[in-house]
Amino acid sequence: MNIVDLTVRYGSATAVDRVSLEIPPGTTVGLVGESGSGKSTLAKAIVGLVPIASGRIDGVDPRRRQIVFQDPYGSLNPRMTVGASVAEGLGLPRADRAAEVRRLLAQVNLDPALADRYPRELSGGQRQRVAIARAIGARPELLVADEITSALDVSVQGAVLNLIRELRAERRLSVLFISHNLAVVRYVADIVAVMRAGRLVEVGPTDQVVGAPRDEYTRALLAAVPNLGGRPAVTR
């Protein structure tokens, strides 16, 4: 997918300013930056949740772009069971939905029996996996993951990050992984894009950006992350 000169405005304020970014098939691009840098606005523009003032997005049909948000409880209908939430966007005959829901829950390492539970009965990590299952059920070519691990415990973060890596490999997904945490992005991303005040200030292979950053802002972000040489806990 190619994002070309994308601009998003809220009234007179420019939230995303002429951003161009390529997300190759089967690749995870990590988008990092401080709160208010425009990351989430870019994510919402990609999936059509906010209007684009100018620019374009090429290469992936809008119907093949899905997003998973930071707060899975807020994105799941509390009145619907897990199974109903996952089945909602499948586009399958009713008779085929239950089996596909079970398959999707198993694919995100959840017990298919949880299909009969409600979101309030699950842990935060389980709810996030349900949100991912619902997103991949729509058979996307691009998955936008917007701060999906920031509200989770460290041990659960590792499991969710591993899941994203597995799904990318199995489905040849393009992934835009948004985070303020460069240590997390380093673990999951092939390419890193650094955003500041609505603009991209640096883009490159992860090891290059982390190991030899060119931009002063990237160096400041790196300096703010303790023990960057380590990796997130990898557990299930």
Image (cartoon, helix red, strand yellow):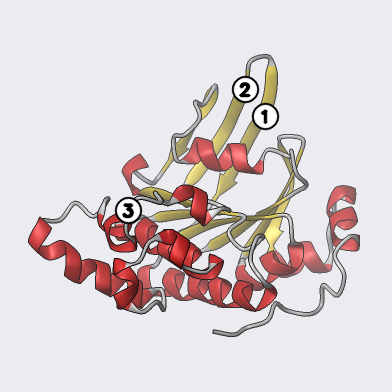
Under tag 1, what secondary structure?
strand
The amino acid type found where label 2 is placed reads: Arg
Question: What is the crowding at mark 1: few (fewer than 14 residues within 10 Å), some, or many (at least 20)?
Answer: many
- The answer to which quarter of the image holds residue 180 is bottom right
For the residues labelled 2 and 3, the Cα–Cα distance comes to 35 Å
Q: In this view, does 12 lie above or below 133?
A: above
Residue at image location 53% in from the left, 51% down from the top: 69
| Residue toward you, 123 or 97 | 123
For the C terminus, the quadrant is bottom right
How much space separates mark 2 and mark 1, taking CA atoms? 5 Å
Across the whole image, how many numbered discs are drawn on residues?
3
Point out residue 171 in the picture as x, y percentages from the top left corner: 36, 69
**Residue topped by disc 2:** 9
Q: Residue 195 carries which label?
A: none
Left or right placement of residue 207 versus residue 125 in this view: right
Q: In this view, does 207 lie to the left or right of 82?
A: right
Mark 2 neighbour density, 10 Å: few (under 14) some (14–19) many (20 or more): some
Rendered residue at 68%/24% (across/down): 14
Q: Are dots 2 and 1 in contact, CB under 8 Å?
A: yes
Q: Mark 3 points at which residue?
A: 80
Q: Which amino acid does label 3 sit on?
A: Met
Residue 110 in view (yes/no):
yes
Q: Earlier in the sequence, mark 1 or mark 3?
A: 1
When the figure is inspected, residue 89 is found, relative to residue 196, above or below; the finding is: below
Q: Nearer the viewer, mark 2 or mark 3?
A: 3
Taking depth in this image into account, of 79 and 15 the one nearest to the observer is 79
Question: Which of the two discs, 1 and 3, sits closer to the camera?
Answer: 3
> What residue did someone put label 1 on?
15
Sequence-first disc among 2 and 3: 2
Percent position (x, y) of residue 118? 38, 61
